[in-house]
Amino acid sequence: MIRARKKFTIYDLKKLKGKRCLTHIHVKSPEEAIAAEKAGVDLMSCSFDSVESQAQLPRLVEAAPNSFFSGATPHGLTSQEEAIRIGFKALEMGASSVYCSASPWMIEAMAREGIPVVGHLGLVPRHVTWTNYRAIGKTVEEGKMLYQKMKDLESSGAYAAEIECVPHQLASWLCSETSLLLMSLGSGSGCDTQFLFSDDILGDYDERVPRHAKAYRDFSAEFRRLQEERITAFQEYIADVGNGSFPHSNNLIEIDEIELEALKDSIRKS
């Protein structure tokens, strides 16, 4: 069912805190953005961490003009000035906010300039050398650390934080203890948004679907089928050329025989 669209603002999102859990998908192509908007998803995010993804953002915004996009900034920002520059660039290219997994010090610089920033809590894939891939917050010590990091993000001026692979009971409690919008990725349904990557929803890879995700389709199998169809189509084309059945008469352009003979005579005489 396609719902009427309203492009959310940060003001709208903050007003919705505690009212309902918003749906949130990370998309990677204009086709996915169109599908997500037509399906009625509330929020979208996308990459903004490479030359290619930065060039892609305007195409995503054009494809889904009534949708809220958050662009993920590069890992390893080297200065507050760079963070501000990239943040404004994302907004100028159509993003509604930016995601940044850097420190509150970096986020604060962007927030001071009015750039809406989403921080990160829990498992940070870019920092797994410190934690391994696992749930974060299953002990008192880690729970207290998450709480303090959440408060640090609040103080930095972030308006939201992705909260990844945190026990759902803890994530729900943390959500009730903060003005931040908490965006749950593998942290249960008690947060302000439920976040999944399009790759997970579509089954768009050959690996096992993560525990926190659900594949609603098997695009990986479909892509394998399409690749076999490509090979077969190319083989049939090669065979048709070899046996003379392509091009057929209906694939050919004709010239009147009288015109052709006149052309030949004209060239011979010249």
Image (spheres, grey):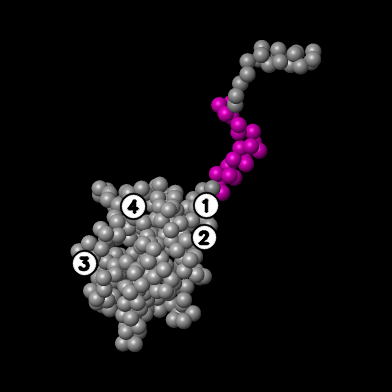
Q: Under tag 3, what secondary structure?
A: loop
Quadrant in which the C terminus appears: top right
Q: How far apart are marks 2 and 1 (CA)?
A: 28 Å
Q: Position of residue 83 (x, y in %)?
A: 46, 65
| Mark with earlier residue (2, 1) | 2
Q: Under tag 4, what secondary structure?
A: loop
Crowd band around label 2 with a 10 angstrom C-alpha radius: few (<14), some (14–19), many (20+): few
Q: Which residue corresponds to the image point at 40% horizontal and 79% vertical from the top-left?
A: 134
**The magenta stretch spans which residues?**
231-251
Instruction: Name the residue that disc number 3 marks.
Output: 18
Q: Under tag 2, what secondary structure?
A: loop
| Mark with earlier residue (2, 3) | 3
Describe residue 249's horizontal placement relative to residue 42 as left or right: right
Crowd band around label 4 with a 10 angstrom C-alpha radius: few (<14), some (14–19), many (20+): many
Q: Which residue corresponds to the image point at 45% horizontal and 80% vertical from the top-left?
A: 132
Image vertical order of residue 140 relative to residue 38, above or below: below
Crowd band around label 3 with a 10 angstrom C-alpha radius: few (<14), some (14–19), many (20+): few
Q: Where is residue 89 in the image (x, y as percent from the top left)?
A: 46, 57
Q: Total label count?
A: 4
| Mark with earlier residue (3, 1) | 3
Image vertical order of residue 27 relative to residue 185, above or below: above
Marker disc for residue 168:
none
Q: Distance between the residues labelled 4 and 1?
A: 32 Å
Q: Nearer the viewer, mark 2 or mark 1?
A: 2
Instruction: Name the residue that disc number 4 marks.
Output: 67
Q: Can residue 82 be seen in this view?
A: yes
Identity, as a three-letter code, of the amino acid under mark 2: Ser
Marker disc for residue 227:
1
Identity, as a three-letter code, of the amino acid under mark 4: Ser
Identity, as a three-letter code, of the amino acid under mark 1: Gln
Of residue 234 and residue 153, the one placed in the foreground of this image is 153
